[in-house]
Amino acid sequence: MKIIIKDSAADASAAVADILLRQIIQKPESVLGLPTGGTPLGVYARVREAYQHGRGSFAAVTTFNLDEYIGLAADDPASYAHYMSENLFAHVNIDASRTHIPSGMAVDPDIEAARYESLITAYGGIDLMLLGLGRNAHIGFNEPGSAHGSRTRRVSLTPSTIEANAGYFAPGARQPSHAITMGIGTILECRKIVVLATGPEKAEAVAASVNGPSSDDVPGSALMRHHDTTIVLDKAAARDLERSKIRELEA
Ligand code: F6R
């Protein structure tokens, strides 16, 4: 695991956007794994801006999103499909048929999860996976207790995750309690992983994920098992890391 610590969330987002752009410039047919949520908004804004200035093309890129809520249609404003369209896909030259997100409306979410997992394999796996980190150290919607070998599947969200994400739903809108998520084992098979975490509310999750020990109780700690993970932080999110650990991991 390598660490990059920036002064601000904006600088950390810029660093991650740069990694994404370099990936698609070096390998135009890259397969990307993408997160949603508040953290990557700055990354997508920077990528859109760079694209408008002629840096990077998505013409040959394929994407797989990490997760989707069960029960939300792609056009629901709170769905991750809608988020991706608004924040990235509608603004770049990506081929919509190569953007993949689990269907929240599948009749059988278990079959949908298996289909998604096979599709990732059919594309030859994911070159670069971007991740956010939950306050309870979840990655994707792999909540504490998820096995580090878990595959894409239907999961229940914890009350703390439901509460943390409540702000993304309109007042009175029904908030799902289940999702389909890539598994931790699926994530660990990606060739390169970049995690972005910013803000003091992520400091504990960052410290538990980076300091170890690696345990099913801390999904983010599974990333220690991966050969090419970079965690990009702002100072607030790095607050609880030991100095010696930072020196050991600084990229
Ligand atoms: C989103 C996802 C989640 C988020 C995490 C952090 O696709 O898989 O793991 O990355 O919940 O969310 P924010 O960035 O909103 O704090």
Image (tube, rainbow, N blue to C red):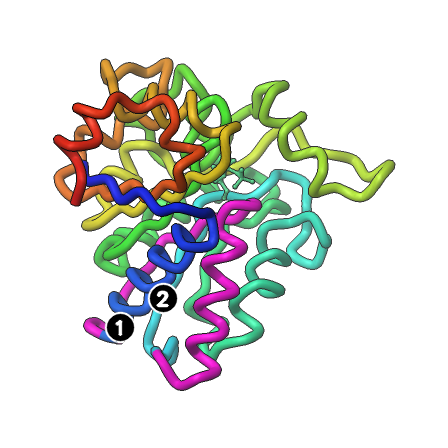
Q: Where does label 2 land, which residue?
A: 62
Where is residue 45 shown, x and y percent of the image?
Answer: 52, 65
Where is residue 224 shown, x and y percent of the image?
Answer: 20, 29
Residue 45 falls inside the magenta stretch: yes
Q: Nearer the viewer, residue 245 or 116?
A: 245
Where is residue 94 shown, x and y percent of the image?
Answer: 45, 75
Mark 1 surroundings: few (<14), some (14-19) or many (≥20) residues within 10 A: some
Residue 240, quarter of the rendered image? top left
* Three-letter code for the amino acid on which mark 1 is drawn: Glu
* Lower sequence index among marks 2 and 1: 1
On screen, residue 247 above or below 94? above
Find out if the beta carbon at label 1 lies less than 8 Å from the nearest ligand 1 atom.
no
Cβ atoms under marks 2 and 1 closer than 8 Å: yes
User: What element does badge 2 sit on?
Assistant: strand
Residue 68, quarter of the rendered image? top right
Magenta residues span 26-55
Q: Is residue 208 left or right of residue 67?
A: left
On screen, residue 69 above or below 98? above
Q: Is residue 159 left or right of residue 88?
A: right
Q: Nearer the viewer, residue 217 or 49?
A: 49
Q: CA distance from mark 2 to mark 1?
A: 7 Å
Furthest residue to the bottom?
A: 54
Q: Where does label 1 land, which residue?
A: 29
Furthest residue to the right?
A: 172
